[in-house]
Amino acid sequence: MSMQDPVSDMLTCIRNAQMMGIQEISLPGSQLKGEILRVLQEEGYIDSFQLSDAGNNKKVLSVVLKYFQGLPVIAKIKRVSRPALRVYQGFKEIAQVRGGLGIAIISTPKGVMTDKSARAQKVGGEVLCTVE
């Protein structure tokens, strides 16, 4: 059976690993997942990630999660747009997450970026997930 929503699977793996206190996880890789992880790293939610080839045209993402005083840095990560219900918003409609304390990750024509960057560049797009 094929996976219907690989981004949701990645977010669930991150959520589950942090509940268990796991430092590093491996996931099936893709370009979109790599871009989401790049934004999470730039914003300080994860330590690092690496995309590598596992052979047979398969890619693997290794993600090092971040903890502060024994607690995960990511308190809540939620998928917004999903295959059955895509959520698109213009830059004026993008709401702040927790009054600016969290971020929304948005896929725009200029690439994957945070809600703050999308508002600054005046581009809208598909709201992939929110992170608090």
Image (cartoon, grey):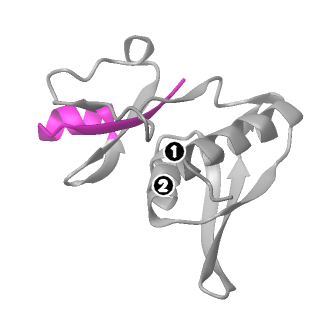
Dot 1, crowdedness within 10 Å: few (<14), some or many (≥20)? Answer: many
Q: Which stretch appears magenta?
A: 114-132
Tell me which residue sits at (82%, 48%) in the image.
23
Residue 129 in the magenta stretch? The answer is: yes
Dot 2, crowdedness within 10 Å: few (<14), some or many (≥20)? Answer: some
**In this view of the protein, which residue sits in the foreground, 88 or 26?**
88
Label 2: state its secondary structure: helix
Residue 115 in the magenta stretch? The answer is: yes
Q: Position of residue 96 (x, y in %)?
A: 33, 18
Tell me which residue sits at (38%, 18%) in the image.
100
Q: Which residue is mark 2?
A: 38
Label 1: state its secondary structure: helix
Q: Which residue is mark 1?
A: 40
- Residue 45, by quadrant, is top right
* Marks 2/1: CA–CA distance: 5 Å
Task: Locate residue 106 relative to residue 92 in the image: left or right.
Answer: right
Q: Residue furthest bottom?
A: 56
Q: Position of residue 18 (x, y in %)?
A: 78, 36
Q: Position of residue 109 (x, y in %)?
A: 19, 53
* Circles 2 and 1: CB atoms closer than 8 Å: yes
